[in-house]
Image (cartoon, rainbow, N blue to C red):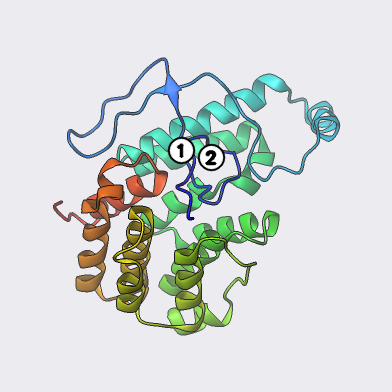
C-alpha cells in the first residue's frame, strides 16, 4: 500500500516529504488554514544522507564547523518547514538558505527549499535544487516531477520533457502513474479516475499532481479544480503530510478560496 509521508524531515519512507513534529513552541498562523504544528527538539540525521560520522567529523574540522552548527542547521530547516506550512514562503526560503550557510552539506537534501522556490517563481533555482536532490537519490520520483514543473515554466513543457530526470521505479502506484504522465505526456483526468475509489492518500496525490500537470500546461481553470479538490479531500483536510500543506499553500499563493 502507499504509505503517507512521514512526520520526521529526514527519515526515508515511501512518502518521504515530511513535516517536523515539534513540542516546545508554536508559531501564529492564518486561522482554519493549516494544521496545528508543534516543535520537537529531537534532531535526526538528514534523510538519504551518505555522510558517515567520521567523514562528517573531517568536514567539521576542515570548515571549522561542528555539532552545534549542524544542529542549528536542522533547526533552521524545521523553522522553514513551519513557515511554509503557515504560508510564509519567503520566510521559509530564508530559513532554508540559513541552514545551508550553517551546514553546506544540507543543500543536497533540501527538497523543501525547492518547493518554496517554485512558489516564489524562482524556477531556475528550484530546478537546480531538485536536480541536486535527485543526484543524491536517483529513485526520487517527486523531485523529478518538480524539476519538470520548474523547467516547464522556464522553457515550456515540450523542452522540459526532453530533459526530464529519469528515476527508478516508485513503489507507490499513484506516483508511478503520475511520473509516467509527466514524463511521456498523458491525461490527468485518467489519473484521478484511476484512484478516485482508492485509498484517501492516493486520491489526494492523484488530484494534486493532476492539478500540477495542468499548471505546467498553463491551464489555470483545471489546475484550480484539481488542487482545490485535493485540499478538500479527507486526506488533504486531516493529514499532517507536508504535501497536504503544500496544496493549501498553492491555493493561498493563487488567491483561491477553499
Q: Which residue is mark 1?
A: 94
Labelled disc at residue 125: none
Q: From the viewer's perspective, is 11 left or right of 114?
A: right
Q: Residues within 10 Å of mark 2 (few under 14, many from 20)?
A: many
Residue 120 appearing in the image: no
Q: Residue at x 64, y 56 (%)?
A: 132
Q: Residue furthest left?
A: 257
In percent of the image, x 77 and y 39: which residue is there? 51
**Crowdedness near tag 1: few (<14), some (14–19) or many (≥20) residues, C-alpha within 10 Å:** some
Q: Which residue corresponds to mark 2?
A: 97
Q: Position of residue 84 (x, y in %)?
A: 37, 40
133 or 48: nearer the viewer: 48
Q: Residue 211: percent from the left, percent from the top?
A: 31, 67
Q: Quadrant of residue 162?
A: bottom right
Q: Is residue 168 in view?
A: yes
Using the rendered view, name the quadrant where residue 29 is placed.
top left
Q: Are marks 1 and 2 in contact (CB under 8 Å)?
A: yes
Extreme residue in the top direction? 24
- Residue located at (51% from left, 69% from top): 176
**Mark 1 secondary-structure assignment:** helix
Can you say whether 27 is above or below 84 in the image? above
| Point 46% across, 62% down: residue | 123
Front-most of 3 and 128?
3
Of residues 255 and 221, which is closer to you in this image?
A: 221
Using the numbered discs, state the Cα–Cα distance from disc 1 to disc 2 in whole angstroms.
5 Å
Q: Is residue 176 above or below residue 227?
A: below
Amino acid at each position: 500500500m502507499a504509505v503517507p509521508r512521514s512526520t520526521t524531515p529526514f527519515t526515508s519512507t515511501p512518502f518521504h516529504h515530511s513535516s517536523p513534529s515539534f513540542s516546545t513552541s508554536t508559531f501564529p498562523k492564518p486561522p482554519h488554514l493549516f494544521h496545528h504544528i508543534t516543535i520537537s527538539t529531537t534532531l535526526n540525521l538528514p534523510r538519504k544522507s551518505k555522510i558517515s560520522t567520521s567523514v562528517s567529523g573531517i568536514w567539521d574540522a576542515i570548515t571549522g564547523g561542528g555539532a552545534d552548527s549542524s544542529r542549528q542547521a536542522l533547526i533552521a530547516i524545521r523553522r522553514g518547514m513551519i513557515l511554509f506550512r503557515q504560508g510564509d514562503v519567503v520566510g521559509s526560503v530564508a530559513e532554508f538558505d540559513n541552514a545551508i550557510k550553517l551546514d553546506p552539506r544540507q543543500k543536497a537534501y533540501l527538497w523543501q527549499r525547492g518547493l518554496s522556490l517554485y512558489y516564489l517563481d524562482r524556477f531556475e533555482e528550484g530546478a537546480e535544487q531538485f536536480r541536486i536532490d535527485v543526484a543524491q537519490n536517483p529513485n526520487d520520483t517527486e523531485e523529478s516531477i518538480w524539476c519538470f514543473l520548474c523547467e516547464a515554466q522556464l522553457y515550456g513543457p515540450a523542452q522540459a520533457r526532453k530533459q526530464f530526470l529519469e528515476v527508478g521505479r516508485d513503489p507507490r502506484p499513484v506516483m508511478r502513474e503520475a511520473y509516467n504522465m509527466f514524463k511521456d505526456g498523458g491525461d490527468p483526468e485518467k489519473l484521478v479516475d484511476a484512484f478516485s475509489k482508492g485509498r484517501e492518500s492516493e486520491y489526494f496525490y492523484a488530484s494534486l499532481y493532476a492539478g500540477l500537470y495542468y499548471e505546467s500546461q498553463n491551464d489555470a481553470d483545471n489546475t484550480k479544480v484539481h488542487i482545490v479538490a485535493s485540499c478538500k479531500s479527507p486526506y488533504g483536510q486531516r493529514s499532517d503530510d507536508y504535501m497536504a500543506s503544500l496544496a493549501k499553500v498553492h491555493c493561498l499563493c493563487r488567491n483561491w478560496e477553499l
